[in-house]
Image (spheres, helix red, strand yellow):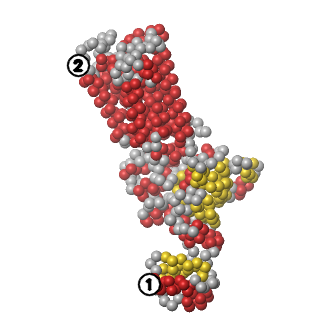
């Protein structure tokens, strides 16, 4: 299958590929090309390109307003792109969106459920819309609701807690066993226990071979679940890769955090550290803490850094986190 | 584009379930028509007979107005339903599934029509059966059909209103305002000698319906030759079949406009 871009930046497909080779070529189940969405002249998504492998969990990480949800709304066919196109499965988002709909499941950011109905009625309705048989709907509904700990509730969904509504929202997106699942902030607003339940459930889904596209501004969530992460900011993808690749590319070196008894101690240490060539970045944190990024490994740490700092309260080694990577790429914290 | 299929029925089923659990909606469906009939009956109980025509009481003559008012409430309920689906994201969720907007609209019309029929059965049973409004039994199916067709026009008007309003509360307020204004302008509440009445579907529904009440069995004879004879509002030279055509035209216009505008405003 050849992918070419027209003048209008739409993808066309000249499909001469024998059937048995298709699967191989569809290793990338989603290919996004120059996708763009503007609202009143303001670009919410600014010409993004990305590829998602079949069966992987792909996270779009970014702060609120980065364009993650707009991207998801375009890929799930409910929002028409201003420019560009995407291939989902074998179909063009622009020209064949009705063929894409049966392939996908969508769990929106807000709890979009029919509140007057019971959990079973909500899930059954989605199953019916996907043309499923009643017996199959009933069987799968029971399994999914049990897994999510919301089975057997006969009262309407409006009586559910926020966490239960969130889980029902997720079940509704799964009833028809979609090939591709879009999860927009799936654990937003959940307590730690419910969040863990949702994460475990997502991991189980991943093990079934389902392709999952997840948006989040929670770095731990992205770190825990993702095979591949794309970082979005101001409508653009500013970095993309596996967590390891992102860490390597961010090149922050080693990170060590010192805490000091007083502000004076901290300033004294900071002034000394500034003179060390291997120290690449010093960040002052709350509670008299310094975060130091340095190169040269253990040798540099022992000989140069420890030698300069006369007294400190605690020290803590850590690896680059997604937060560090985001900070380096954008110059601000993810939650700013 | 997906064609209309059985999914419209499942959408209607879902809408009916939602409405049954909504107390406000059930009030408008069941309690309100009965309340209106009692209010009208009490209001005209001291009638001295001066407004009678062909031996009919004022209550008999005003009865079509009650039908128009009650069925016209579909404007409000459908406006709220569509505005709600926009606001709570359920419309967008349905849009991400393999189901056409045609099914969504048809599902809404089916569910609204089901409740409209419940209202009509209640009005007919209570009005004719309990309160003794006059009506030729043979004409009842035609009267019922006219009311249902008008109800579909009311749904179309609700759809137009929902297209422009972002919240169900706003849709409720505006639709109620529009419905009440049209009731007054059309002369459905009380006689109005003004040309503006011709531009409202309510006028034509009430007048044709009134013919059924007044002339009874002679309706079919007067269908082609007669005029919209009205003791209660502005008369026209348009024959009864013309009035029927006007009702169909208004219904088609409101539904087509409603669908077009709603599509334009909600396909992002």
A206 with respect to B177 (left or right): right
Tags 1 and 2 touching, CB below 8 Å: no
Q: Chain of mark 1?
A: A
In the rendered image, residue B193, in percent from the top left (x then y), is placed at 38, 18
In the rendered image, residue B27, in percent from the top left (x then y), is placed at 33, 36
Q: Quadrant of residue A50?
A: bottom right
Mark seen at residue B46: 2
B23 with respect to A316 (left or right): left
Residue at the spot of label 1: A262
Q: Are marks 1 and 2 on the same chain?
A: no
In the rendered image, residue A159, in percent from the top left (x then y), is placed at 37, 51
Mark seen at residue B64: none
Q: Residues within 10 Å of mark 1 (few under 14, many from 20)?
A: few
Q: Chain of mark 2?
A: B
Q: Residues within 10 Å of mark 2 (few under 14, many from 20)?
A: few
**Looking at the image, residue B56 lies above or below residue A155:** above
Q: Secondary structure at mark 2?
A: loop
Q: Residue at x 25, y 24 (%)?
A: B42
Q: Residue at x 41, y 32 (%)?
A: B178
Q: Residue at x 39, y 29 (%)?
A: B181
The N terminus of chain B appears in which quarter of the rendering? top right
Examine the rendering and report whether any part of residue B101 can be seen: no
């Amino acid at each position: 299958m050849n992918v070419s871009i027209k003048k209008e930046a739409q993808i066309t497909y000249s499909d001469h590929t024998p059937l048995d080779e298709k699967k191989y070529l569809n290793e990338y189940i989603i290919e996004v090309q120059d996708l763009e969405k503007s609202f009143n002249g303001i670009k919410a998504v600014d010409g993004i390109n990305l590829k998602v492998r079949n069966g992987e969990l792909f996270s779009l990480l970014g702060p609120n307003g980065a364009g993650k949800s707009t991207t998801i709304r375009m890929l799930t066919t409910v929002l028409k792109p201003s420019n560009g196109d995407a291939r989902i499965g074998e179909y063009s988002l622009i020209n064949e969106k009705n063929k894409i709909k049966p392939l996908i499941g969508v769990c929106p950011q807000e709890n979009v459920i029919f509140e007057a109905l019971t959990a079973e009625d909500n899930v059954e309705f989605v199953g019916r819309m996907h043309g499923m048989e009643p017996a199959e709907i009933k069987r799968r509904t029971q399994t999914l609701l049990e897994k999510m700990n919301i089975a057997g509730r006969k009262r309407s969904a409006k009586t559910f807690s926020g966490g239960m509504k969130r889980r029902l929202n997720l079940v509704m997106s799964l009833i028809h066993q979609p090939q591709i699942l879009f999860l927009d902030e799936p654990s937003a607003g959940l307590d730690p226990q419910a969040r863990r339940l949702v994460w475990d459930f997502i991991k189980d889904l991943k093990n079934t071979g389902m392709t999952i596209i997840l948006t989040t501004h929670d770095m731990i969530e992205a770190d825990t679940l993702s095979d591949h992460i794309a970082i979005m900011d101001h409508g653009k993808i500013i970095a993309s890769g596996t967590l390891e690749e992102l860490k390597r590319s961010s090149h922050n070196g080693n990170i060590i955090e010192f805490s000091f008894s007083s502000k004076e101690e901290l300033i004294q240490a900071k002034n000394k550290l500034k003179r060390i060539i291997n120290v690449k970045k010093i960040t002052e944190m709350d509670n008299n803490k310094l975060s130091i990024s340095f190169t040269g490994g253990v040798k540099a740490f022992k000989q140069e850094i420890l030698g300069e700092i006369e007294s400190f309260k605690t020290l803590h080694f850590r690896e680059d986190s997604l937060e560090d990577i985001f900070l380096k790429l954008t110059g601000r914290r993810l939650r700013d | 584009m997906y064609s209309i299929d059985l999914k419209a029925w499942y959408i209607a089923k879902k809408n009916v379930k939602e409405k049954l659990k909504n107390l406000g909606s059930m009030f408008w469906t069941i309690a309100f028509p009965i309340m209106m009939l009692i209010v009208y009956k009490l209001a005209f109980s001291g009638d001295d007979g001066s407004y009678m025509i062909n031996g009919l009481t004022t209550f008999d003559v005003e009865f079509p107005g009650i039908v128009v008012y009650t069925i016209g409430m579909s404007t409000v309920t459908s406006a709220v339903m569509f505005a709600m689906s926009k606001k709570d994201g359920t419309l967008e969720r349905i849009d991400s599934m393999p189901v056409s907007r045609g099914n969504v609209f048809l599902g809404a019309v089916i569910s609204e029509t089901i409740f409209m029929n419940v209202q009509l059965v209640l009005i007919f049973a209570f009005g004719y059966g309990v309160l003794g409004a006059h009506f030729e039994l043979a004409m009842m199916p035609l009267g019922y059909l006219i009311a249902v067709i008008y109800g579909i026009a009311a749904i179309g008007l609700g759809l137009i209103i929902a297209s422009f309003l972002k919240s169900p509360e706003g849709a409720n307020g505006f639709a109620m305002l529009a419905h009440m204004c049209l009731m007054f302008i059309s002369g459905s509440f009380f006689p109005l000698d003004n040309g503006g009445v011709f531009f409202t579907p309510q006028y034509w529904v009430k007048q044709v319906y009134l013919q059924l009440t007044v002339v009874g069995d002679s309706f079919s004879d007067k269908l082609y030759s007669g005029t919209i004879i009205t003791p209660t509002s502005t008369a026209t030279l348009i024959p009864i079949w013309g009035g029927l055509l006007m009702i169909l035209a208004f219904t088609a216009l409101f539904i087509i406009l409603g669908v077009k505008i709603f599509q334009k405003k909600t396909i992002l």
